[in-house]
């Protein structure tokens, strides 16, 4: 009798470990705009994703994390005209935004009053949203290219004021014409 014994061992081992959690956070904001005719019927609605400008991020971080004294000035929402428009940029500031002009007084379309002041609901789940009505009653024909927000030292409700810190700016997918008697209503959401 012949016995044949073949012995062998195979061991395979593997390990997957989570070396640490990585959380990536970035500021992201968007505006929602709706234009109504003089009878209150909606003409167009658009969500406008925007860039949160570098100086706006820096001012927000300084107020929240450096413990410095901070009093809210504004924020004020402003419309961007299609006149001479080329682009918005994260590097834009209220004093220097060569790719766009603010709508109102000197640049069509015009609207009654001043830049609206924006109020915010309490933040929740890393998101803050505007509260109340932010509206522009259009008084002169023109085309809206986008929307922006300014706040902080030097910011005012005066159209074309170049003071303050530009928080964000965004453009519509398609520039939208408005006429006398239209009302544009806006909201803003910011999340990190």
Image (cartoon, rainbow, N blue to C red):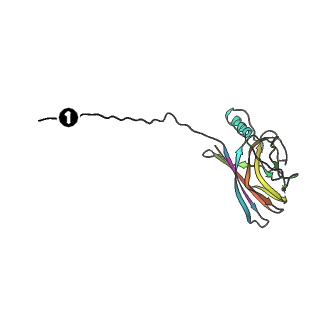
User: Camera-side residue: 33 or 128?
Assistant: 33
How far across and down, in percent of the image, does residue 115 sit?
Answer: 81, 50
How far across and down, in percent of the image, does residue 113 sit?
Answer: 84, 54
User: Camera-side residue: 81 or 99?
Assistant: 99
Q: Quadrant of the C terminus?
A: top right
Judged left or right of residue 68, residue 126 is left
The residue at the point 83 percent across, 58 percent down is 142
Q: Is residue 32 within the magenta segment?
A: yes
Q: Which residues are magenta?
A: 29-34
Question: Is 27 above or below relative to 65?
Answer: below
Total label count?
Answer: 1
The residue at the point 64 percent across, 41 percent down is 26
Judged left or right of residue 188, residue 98 is right
Q: Which residue is mark 1?
A: 5
Q: Which residue sits furthest left?
A: 1
Q: Which residue sits furthest right?
A: 106
Callout 1: SS: loop
Q: Which residue sits furthest bottom?
A: 39
Q: Quadrant of the N terminus?
A: top left
How far across and down, in percent of the image, does residue 20 sit?
Answer: 51, 34
Secondary structure mainly formed by the magenta segment: strand
User: Camera-side residue: 22 or 137?
Assistant: 22
Quarter of the image for residue 112 reads bottom right
Q: Is residue 131 visible?
A: no
């Amino acid at each position: 009798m012949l016995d044949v014994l073949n012995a062998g061992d195979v061991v395979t081992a593997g390990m997957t470990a989570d070396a640490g959690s990585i959380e990536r956070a970035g500021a992201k904001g968007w505006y929602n705009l709706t234009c109504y005719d003089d009878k209150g019927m909606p003409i167009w609605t658009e969500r406008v994703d925007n860039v949160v400008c570098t100086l706006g991020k820096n001012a927000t971080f300084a107020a929240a994390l450096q413990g410095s004294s901070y009093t809210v000035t504004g924020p004020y929402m402003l419309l961007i005209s299609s006149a001479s428009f080329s682009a918005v940029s994260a590097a834009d500031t209220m004093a220097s935004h060569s790719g766009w002009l603010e709508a109102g007084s000197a640049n069509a379309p015009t609207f009654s009053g001043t830049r609206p002041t924006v109020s915010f609901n309490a933040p929740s789940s890393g998101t803050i949203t505007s509260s109340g009505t932010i509206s522009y009653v259009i008084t002169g024909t023109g085309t809206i290219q986008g929307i922006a927000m300014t706040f902080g030292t030097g910011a005012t409700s005066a159209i074309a004021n170049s003071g303050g810190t530009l928080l964000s700016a965004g453009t519509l997918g398609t520039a939208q014409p408005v006429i006398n008697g239209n009302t544009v209503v806006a909201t803003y959401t910011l999340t990190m």
